[in-house]
């Protein structure tokens, strides 16, 4: 049974676990929230120790055939675009390796002409010897299309549903194949069937009431833990950030609510990884570390070529799939446009030092895989 069946009946039928989760995210007094925080801290310690996995996104391309109202890469945005060559990807990856990273997330907009399956496989195969953990966040594919990507060396797949509300999803995704809600929703299972053993899901907070999104996310985690039982499940909690196109969040989620959500997830799903990106500002990231977050990006760039300024010599704009020369605005940096603005721009070594000061071990390389072989 697909998760869509569970999702569509969530308004009138919830599992006992999801009902308990819903109680945990209801408004709480300061004392109750502190008690939740203590439980979450202790469960995180029991299940993950004092470790924090560090990873970096590596953007391959910002071409996209979809229009997502909240995203700077949307096809109708007149941004500077580029798809890095494999050599340029290698240069970016070398930079990240030099900074200490052994876990990378390859990210690309959704454009089959620029980011073909073969290109993706070649990128993964070329980087695999240097990176024990490679995950991808690209256009959803069929299981058969995922198989060569896994064989090339990718082990993780990240796909956010963005919003679990069908009507909001239809309103936000105005053009392109991403409009197919169910195809995206079933993507983690297709990836699992192809051999991916790390599955990352998430909702983009700011498109709808966060509590409704969180309940759907919890139900999705519960479903995937059963259906994809051999995979490690991680959950990301991105809040909308300013991006090209000027979209602003429609619904707010306070820092306190974000902290409560992290605690509720940890209490409900003690073994699920919780991922925090550089979208959040430094003080909040530092505060959430001890509550349940287990994986953080650091020193991130969301523009292809952003680490080494590679790709700037073939920047362009894309109009209806046609490449046209770029029009630079006065004073504009001649670098591809990023997906969204970063809040925490501290370099990775600074983040690692702060983690150590707080008693955490920053983990650049994931040893689980080697130990389980
Ligand atoms: S969210 Fe993804 S699919 Fe949508 S415009 Fe951005 S890159 Fe493209």
Image: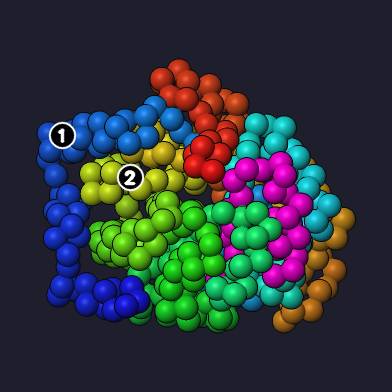
Furthest toward the front, the residue is 373
Q: Quadrant of the N terminus?
A: bottom left
Q: Which mark is residue 35?
A: 1
Query: Residue 156 falls in which quadrant of the image?
Result: bottom right
Identified at 81% across, 74% down, the residue is 323
Who is closer to the viewer here, 311 or 372? 372
Q: Quadrant of the C terminus?
A: top right
Residue at the location (57% across, 60% down)?
A: 137
**Residue appearing at x 56%, y 54% in the figure:** 155
Tell whether 227 sits left or right of 275: left
Where residue 188 appears, as percent x and y from the top left, is: 46, 66
Is residue 124 part of the magenta span, yes or no?
yes
Mark 1 near ligand 1 (CB under 8 Å)? no
Q: Quadrant of residue 110?
A: bottom right
| 368 on left or right of 292 | right
Q: Position of residue 117 (x, y in %)?
A: 70, 70
Picture coordinates of residue 312 (x, y %)?
Answer: 82, 53
Q: Image point 27% across, 63% down: which residue?
A: 219
Looking at the rendered structure, which numbered label has been put on residue 271?
A: 2
Horizontal arrangement in the rendering, residue 222 relative to residue 74 (left or right): left
Q: Secondary structure at mark 2?
A: loop
Residue furthest right in the image:
313
Whether the magenta-drawn stretch holds residue 123 is answered as yes
For marks 2 and 1 on the same chain, the one whose residue lies earlier in the sequence: 1
What stretch of residues is rendered in magenta? 117-140
Instruction: Tell me residue 14's x, y (percent).
Output: 17, 68
> Quick one: SS at disc 1?
helix
């Amino acid at each position: 049974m697909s998760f869509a069946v569970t999702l569509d009946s969530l308004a009138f039928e919830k599992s006992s676990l999801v009902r308990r989760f819903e109680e945990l995210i209801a408004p709480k007094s300061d004392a109750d929230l502190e008690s939740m925080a203590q439980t979450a801290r202790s469960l995180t310690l029991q299940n993950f120790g004092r470790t924090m996995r560090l990873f970096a996104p590596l953007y391959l391309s910002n071409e996209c055939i979809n229009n997502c109202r909240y995203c700077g890469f949307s096809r109708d945005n007149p941004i500077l675009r580029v798809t890095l060559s494999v050599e340029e990807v290698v240069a970016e990856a070398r930079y990240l390796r030099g900074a200490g990273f052994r876990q990378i997330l390859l990210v690309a907009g959704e454009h089959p002409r620029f980011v073909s399956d073969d290109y993706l496989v070649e990128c993964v195969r070329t980087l695999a010897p240097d990176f024990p953990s490679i995950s991808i966040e690209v256009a959803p594919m069929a299981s058969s299309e995922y198989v060569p990507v896994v064989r090339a060396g990718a082990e993780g797949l990240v796909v956010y549903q963005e919003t679990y509300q069908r009507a909001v999803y239809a309103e936000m995704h105005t053009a392109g194949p991403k409009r197919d809600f169910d195809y995206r929703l079933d993507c983690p299972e297709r990836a699992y069937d192809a051999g991916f053993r790390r599955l990352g899901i998430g909702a983009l907070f700011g498109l709808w009431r966060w509590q409704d999104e969180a309940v759907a996310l919890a139900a999705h985690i519960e479903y995937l833990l059963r259906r994809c039982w051999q995979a490690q499940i991680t959950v990301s909690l991105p809040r909308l950030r300013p991006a090209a196109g000027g979209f602003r969040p429609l619904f707010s989620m306070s820092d306190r609510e974000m902290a409560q959500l992290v605690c509720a997830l940890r209490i409900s799903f003690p073994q699920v990884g919780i991922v925090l990106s550089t979208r959040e500002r430094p003080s909040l990231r530092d505060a959430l570390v001890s509550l349940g977050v287990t994986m953080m990006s650091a020193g991130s760039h969301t523009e292809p070529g952003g680490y080494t300024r590679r790709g700037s010599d073939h920047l362009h704009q894309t109009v209806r799939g046609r490449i046209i020369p770029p029009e630079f605005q006065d004073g504009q940096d001649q670098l591809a446009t990023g997906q969204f603005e970063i809040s925490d721009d501290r370099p990775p070594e600074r983040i690692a030092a702060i983690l150590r000061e707080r008693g955490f071990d920053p983990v650049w390389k994931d040893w689980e895989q080697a130990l389980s072989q």
